[in-house]
Image (cartoon, grey):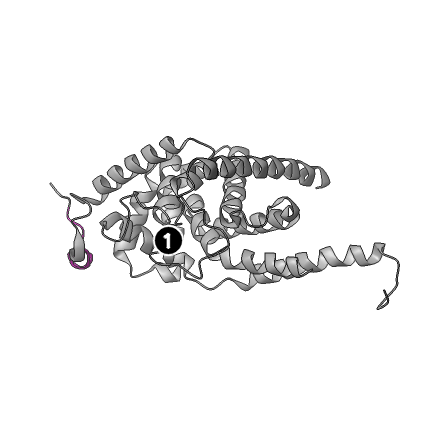
């Protein structure tokens, strides 16, 4: 019984991460939260298959990702057709308004192929190792590395960032003057 | 509904086994890469990147924005909807068990 309580407690602690990952996959907050809900129900049903002591976060991310791609397949990727709507829904999120920089970033992110975007998120934001990300995406570590690298190059291109890493504290001023394309 | 559930069970079972196998394989190969186990990040978990060579740390413009983008959602409190869901799941699990078990309340 106390195991249940512990499992639930850990599940709850990972929900914020699941939501952020889901939002990056789904492109809309409503869909993201539906995905998280599906994930929680499945995780609950399957909790006996989870090995305590192994990585619960990675396990949950794997379930969520599978759910997302299953839904995508069922819907015949209809979501891909409504690019603008995604951006609008995301911009409509109250927390998101006023972050012009963030909106640019989001738009750029949406232009990445799904596999590159998820690799970038898992490594750069969710805090997974390359090995963990490879497990979650069911591909080789090298594949994840090259996806992250390509995603990064593409993002730098889209955002007009030259020599990423030397950007330093100037990123603040870029929010004010807008990100000028590095010609 | 039942069918779907069963199918899902099978999927997740397989998935879990795969993850486990890989995790174990990975652990054997690279003991230095400490897997993130029972330390769930509270809230956003800023700067707690497990990945080192990603070149996506805080010194990178893209890395920083990526974190800002992600934490924008990840720093929100858990919506009640999910807390209520988990509570409901917990109850749903407890109740059929009680119904099936002989009604020996309170005695062992």
Q: Secondary structure at mark 1?
A: helix
Out of A13 and B51, give the one closest to the viewer: B51
For this view, does A120 lie left or right of residue A13? Answer: left
Q: Determine the residue positioned at 36% across, 50% down.
A: A125
For this view, does B7 lie left or right of residue A173? Answer: right
- The question of residue A175 being in magenta is answered with yes
For this view, does A40 lie left or right of residue B60? Answer: right
Quadrant of the rendering where the C terminus of chain A is positioned: top left
Q: Quadrant of residue B99?
A: bottom right
Q: Position of residue A103 (x, y in %)?
A: 30, 52
Q: Is residue A92 visible?
A: no
In the depicted structure, whether residue A29 falls above or below residue A182: below
Q: Main secondary structure of the magenta part?
A: helix
Q: Determine the residue positioned at 63% across, 61% down.
A: A5
Q: Position of residue A90 (x, y in %)?
A: 38, 52
For this view, does B99 lie left or right of residue A34? Answer: right
- The question of residue B90 being in magenta is answered with no
Q: Determine the residue positioned at 49% across, 41% down.
A: A65
Q: Which residue is mark 1?
A: B70
Q: Position of residue A37 (x, y in %)?
A: 56, 52
Q: Quadrant of residue A79?
A: top left
How packed is label 1: few (under 14 Cα within 10 Å), some, or many (20 or more)?
many
Give, as a single range, the part of the protein colored magenta: A171-180
Furthest toward the left, the residue is: A183
Quadrant of the rendering where the N terminus of chain A is positioned: bottom right
Furthest toward the bottom, the residue is: B106
Label 1 marks a residue whose chain is B
Q: Determine the residue positioned at 39% across, 37% down.
A: A114
State the count of labels. 1
Q: Is residue A117 visible?
A: yes
């Amino acid at each position: 019984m106390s195991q249940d309580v512990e499992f639930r407690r850990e599940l709850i602690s990972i929900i914020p991460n699941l939501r952020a990952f889901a939002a990056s996959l789904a492109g809309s907050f409503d869909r993201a939260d539906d995905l998280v809900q599906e994930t929680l129900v499945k995780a609950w049903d399957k909790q006996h298959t989870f090995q305590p002591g192994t990585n619960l976060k990675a396990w949950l991310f794997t379930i969520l990702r599978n759910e997302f791609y299953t839904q995508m397949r069922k819907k015949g990727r209809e979501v891909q057709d409504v690019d603008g709507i995604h951006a609008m829904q995301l911009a409509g999120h109250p927390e998101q308004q006023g972050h012009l920089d963030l909106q640019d970033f989001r738009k750029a992110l949406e232009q990445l192929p799904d596999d590159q975007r998820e690799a970038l998120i898992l490594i750069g934001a969710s805090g997974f190792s390359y090995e963990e990300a490879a497990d979650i995406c069911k591909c080789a570590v090298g594949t994840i590395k090259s996806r992250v690298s390509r995603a990064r190059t593409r993002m730098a291109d889209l955002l007009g960032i030259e020599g990423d890493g030397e950007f330093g504290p100037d990123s603040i001023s870029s929010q004010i003057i807008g990100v000028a394309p590095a010609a | 509904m039942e069918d779907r559930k069963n199918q899902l069970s099978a999927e997740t079972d397989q998935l879990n086994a795969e993850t486990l196998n890989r995790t174990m394989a990975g652990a054997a190969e690279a003991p230095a890469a400490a897997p993130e186990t029972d330390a769930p990040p509270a809230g956003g978990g800023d700067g707690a990147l497990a990945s080192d060579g990603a070149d996506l740390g805080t010194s990178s413009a893209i890395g920083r924005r990526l974190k800002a983008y992600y934490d924008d959602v990840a720093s929100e409190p858990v919506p009640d909807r999910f807390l209520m869901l988990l509570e409901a799941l917990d109850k749903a699990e407890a109740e059929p068990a009680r119904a099936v078990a002989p009604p020996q309340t309170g005695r062992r």
